[in-house]
Image: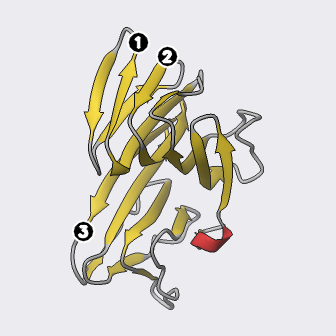
Amino acid sequence: MALLLTPAHKQNTTRWSGGTTTQLCIYPYSATYSGRDFIFRISTATIESEESVFTKLPGYNRILMVLKGNLTLTHAGQHNKSMQPFDTDSFKGEWNTASKGKAVDLNVMVSDKVSAVISILKQPASLVSLNQTDDFIAGYIREGGVTLQSSDAATPPLQKYDFFLWEKDGLPPPSLLLAKDSILILIRINLKP
């Protein structure tokens, strides 16, 4: 599967001890979060409790980006980080991690066999070319709209909260056309040699 599109209305939301979580994708596609057999998982979460404790995920690394609200993460014996919208923090899944504050965040969980980088694209009405060397490129539309264009076709415009995942399989990645005032969170994932 070269391109997976997941519109907001098809995303699955479930409850966790501190609020709700919405899975945007999991890879391999047959993996489950509860089975801990995934290589990577991307999700959003709404933290409804003022204080919460994160589930431990040994063997995984995490990147968390605040999308709305303010959050302070405390990694016992490691470091603390106060975060505002679009700030990120990277940490190991086996750390004892707690949070203070109510927020909405984006979570990228990757096995030790994978590296991931998050960036934000805010360019108004521009065409963005993606790196052909990445193994996976994911995008979460936070504001506005994005159209994915290949050499022979274009997707219908993706809207706020829609998600896409491109997997390298011999085809070049699509180019991205961002509508004016759009915010796209881009996640680049690479399998380690």
Foreground: disc 3 or disc 2: 2
* Upstream in sequence: badge 3 or badge 2: 2
Q: Judge from the rendering whether residue 155 lies leftward or rightward of residue 81; answer left or right.
A: right
Mark number, residue 51:
none
User: Would residue 179 be found to the left or right of residue 45 on screen?
Assistant: left
Tag 2 residue: 96
User: Looking at the image, is mark 3 or mark 1 earlier in the sequence?
Assistant: 1
Q: Locate the N terminus by quadrant.
A: bottom right
Where does residue 156 sit, x and y in percent of width and height? 52, 88
Vertical relation: 54 (above or below) 109 = above
Q: Tell me the mark number nearer the camera, choosing from 3 and 1.
A: 1
**Where on the picture, by quarter, is residue 144?**
bottom left
Residue drawn at the location 58% of the way across and 43% of the way down = 19
Q: Earlier in the sequence, mark 1 or mark 2?
A: 1
**Residue 169 location in percent, x, y?**
59, 63
Q: Is residue 131 visible?
A: no
- Residue marked by disc 3: 122
Q: Residues within 10 Å of mark 2 (few under 14, many from 20)?
A: some
Crowding around mark 3 (Cα neighbors within 10 Å: few <14, some 14 to 19, many 20+) is some
- Under circle 3, the secondary element is loop
Amino acid type, residue under disc 1 in the picture: Ala
Residue that badge 1 annotates: 76
Q: Position of residue 111 (x, y in %)?
A: 57, 33
Residue 69 % position (x, y): 34, 48
Amino acid at pointer 3: Lys
Residue shown at the point (43%, 48%) measured from the top left? 105
Count of marks placed on residues: 3
At 38% from the left edge and 36% from the top edge, which residue is drawn?
101
